[in-house]
Image (cartoon, grey):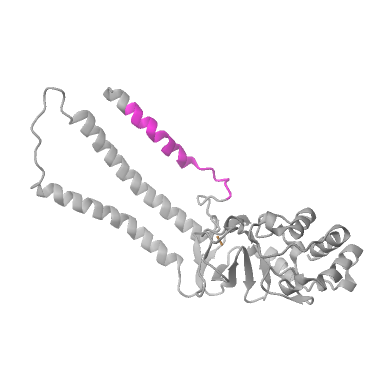
Amino acid sequence: MSRRSALIRTIALLMPVLSGCTASRELPMTTLAPKSDLADWIYHLFLEVTLWDAGILAIVLVAFVLAVFVFSTRVGEAAPPKSAASDLGLEVAWTIGPALVVLMISIPTVRTIFRSQPRIAPEGALHIKVTAHQWWWEFQYEDSGVKTANELHLPIGRPIRLDLVSADVIHSFWVPQLGGKRDVVPGQINELTFVAQIPGTYPGQCAEFCGDSHANMRFRAMVETPDQFAAWTAEQLKPPLAASQIADPAAADGAKMFANSPCVTCHRIEGVSKGYIAPDLSHFGGRTTMAGGIMPNTPENVARWITDPQALKPGAEMPALGLRGQQLNDLVAYLESLK
Ligand code: CUA
C-alpha cells in the first residue's frame, strides 16, 4: 500500500467517528441539550474533557504521521535500532505526560461532582420523594402532599431536591435533558439536586436493568412556569367527585363498580380507596400518559390495559380483571373523568 493510500484510508476510517459529533439537538433522550443547571454543568464538563481529548488526539496523530511519513526508514537504508532502555528524558516524559492528562481531566470532573451534589438541600428547595417500583415511578411532593405517578411536574427557577428510594430492586432515575443518572437503591435515600431552567416535557427512563419491563419503566418531567405549576398543584389538591356528583351516567356507574372491585386493594382514589402498592388514581384522567409512561392516556389504551396488562407490560403485577362491554366502558369513563 502506498503512503498516499494509507493516509486516505486513515481519514476514511475517522469519518464515521467525526460525523457522530453532529448529534441532533432535537433527539428527546439527548444529553447535549441541557435544560437545567445540573445538565448544563455535565454538558460543559463533557465539552471540556472532549477538547482535551481532541488535543491529545491531534498530538498523537501528528506524531503518528511524522513517524510513518517523515522519520521512517526506506527500503535499503535501514539503520540499527537504538535502545531506549536508558533514555531518562523519554522515561520522564512518558510518566509526566499521562499524569498531566489525568490531572487535566480530573480537576474539572471533581469540581463538577462537588458542585452538583450538595449534602444539604438549597434553601427554598422543592422536596419531592421519588419512589421507584417495578415498573413505574411515584412522586410525592413533601410540602403540598400531592402524590402522582409517572409525570413529574416541576417549576422553573426553583431548586428541586429529589429524595430517591426504591420499593423493590435497584433502579436508576434518568432524565437526560435535566441531568445525570442517579441509582435508586433499596434501603437508602439517594439525592438529586438541580434547577430546571427551560419549560418543556422531557422524557425519562429507568437506566438500570430491573426486570422484565425495565424498558417499560418510563416517565416524563414536565417543566412549567411557577404559575402553571401552582395551578397544577391546586388541581391535584382538589378531591375527585363522588359517584353521586358525576354527571356522565357511564362514569357514575364506573365509580360504583370501582368502589366494589378488587382495584381498591392496590389503587388509591381519594375518598374512595386506600390502596398504596399501585399508582394513585385520584387524578388519573389529568395525566397525558399511562402504564409507566409507555403510551398516551386515551380511553382505548385504558381499555386495552385493563383487559390485558401483561400483554402491554410483561411482568406487570396488575391482574386482568376480565371486564368486557358496558362494564369496561363504564370503568374507563370513570377513570378518565378523574381530572
Ligand atoms: Cu427500573 Cu429499570
Q: What is the x, y in percent for residue 43? A: 46, 53
In the image, residue 168 above or below residue 40: below
**Magenta stretch, main secondary structure class:** helix
Q: Quadrant where the N terminus lies?
A: top left
In front of the other: 39 or 257: 257
Q: Is residue 22 magenta?
A: yes
In the image, 195: left or right of 105?
right
What is the number of callouts on the image?
Answer: 0
Q: Quadrant where the C terminus lies?
A: bottom right
The structure residue drawn at horizontal position 19% and vertical position 49%, both measured from the top left corner, is 94
In the image, residue 45 above or below residue 282: above
In front of the other: 95 or 270: 270
Q: What is the x, y in percent for residue 252? A: 88, 67
Location of ligand 1 given as a quarter of the image: bottom right
In the image, 128: left or right of 319?
left
Quarter of the view holding residue 313: bottom right
In the image, residue 262 above or below residue 53: below
In front of the other: 45 or 16: 16
Q: Is residue 62 magenta?
A: no
The structure residue drawn at horizontal position 90% and vertical position 73%, both measured from the top left corner, is 244
Q: What is the x, y in percent for residue 102? A: 29, 55
Numbered range of the magenta stretch: 7-28
In the image, 197: left or right of 273?
left
Q: What is the x, y in percent for residue 127? A: 58, 73
